[in-house]
């Protein structure tokens, strides 16, 4: 009997702690966040000024890789990707744009990249887990977080 009462008491205390936490969150103006939503510094670049430097096919996806001419020239010269640069993957499915995947160099460090997924209308897909993107691209530290660095360096108009 005592053991049962202890379990009930623990359940009541746990419930009260959850309610207390929710009350405090509401009082200070907080709200629960979405599991994958994140804000970051990535902006949509002026794509009409970018160059399509290579194409990658994966399953039903045709990916056009794009960068600014200035970024491509610096990569060709052996320089690192400059801070502020955007790299864009335009993902086509069934002949139409499915999404834009934008990476942006935000600092001087090798891993100083942020990533963002944009819908075809160029609005942000706010529930995308872009931490996955950073994790995958980390495997390419020796190539400036790029899977297509050699294609970017060898591109010529």
Image (cartoon, helix red, strand yellow):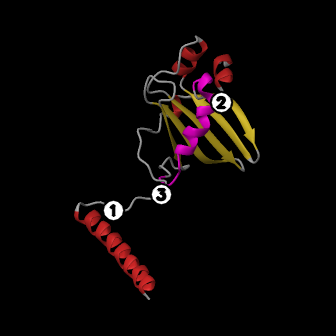
Q: Nearer the viewer, residue 18 or 62?
A: 18
**Residue tagged by mark 1?**
31
Q: Nearer the viewer, mark 3 or mark 2?
A: 3
Kindly check if marks 3 and 2 are in contact, taking CB atoms under 8 A apart as contact: no
**Residue tagged by mark 3?**
35
Magenta residues (range): 126-144
Instruction: Locate residue 129, reporting x and y percent.
Output: 53, 50
Task: State whether the magenta stretch is mostly helix, strand or loop.
Answer: helix
* Snapshot quadrant of residue 11: bottom left
- The question of residue 137 being in magenta is answered with yes
7 is higher (above) or lower (below) than 72 = below
83 is higher (above) or lower (below) than 9 = above
Q: Can I make out residue 108 in this image?
A: yes
* Snapshot quadrant of residue 132: top right
Tell me which residue sits at (56%, 27%) in the image.
67
Side of 155 relative to 112 (left or right): right
Label number found at residue 147:
2
- The question of residue 38 being in magenta is answered with no
Q: Nearer the viewer, residue 54 or 107?
A: 107
At numbered mark 1, what does the secondary structure look like: helix, strand or loop? loop
Disc 1 and disc 3: Cα gap in Å?
A: 12 Å
Q: Hey, which residue is sitting farthest right in the picture?
A: 59
Tell me which residue sits at (50%, 46%) in the image.
122
């Amino acid at each position: 009997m005592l053991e049962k009462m202890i379990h009930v008491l623990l359940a009541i205390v746990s419930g009260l702690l959850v309610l207390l936490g929710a009350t405090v969150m509401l009082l200070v103006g907080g709200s629960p966040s979405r599991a994958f939503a994140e804000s970051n510094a990535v902006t949509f670049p002026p794509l009409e000024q970018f160059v399509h430097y290579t194409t990658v096919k994966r399953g039903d996806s045709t990916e056009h890789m794009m960068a600014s001419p200035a970024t491509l020239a610096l990569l060709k010269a052996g320089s690192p990707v400059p801070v502020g640069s955007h790299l864009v993957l335009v993902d086509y499915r069934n002949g139409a744009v499915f999404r834009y995947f934008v990476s942006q160099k935000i600092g001087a460090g090798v891993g100083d990249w942020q990533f963002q997924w944009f819908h075809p209308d160029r609005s942000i897909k706010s529930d995308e887990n872009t931490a996955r993107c950073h994790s995958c691209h980390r495997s390419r530290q020796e190539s400036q977080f790029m899977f297509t660095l050699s294609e970017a360096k060898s591109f010529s108009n």
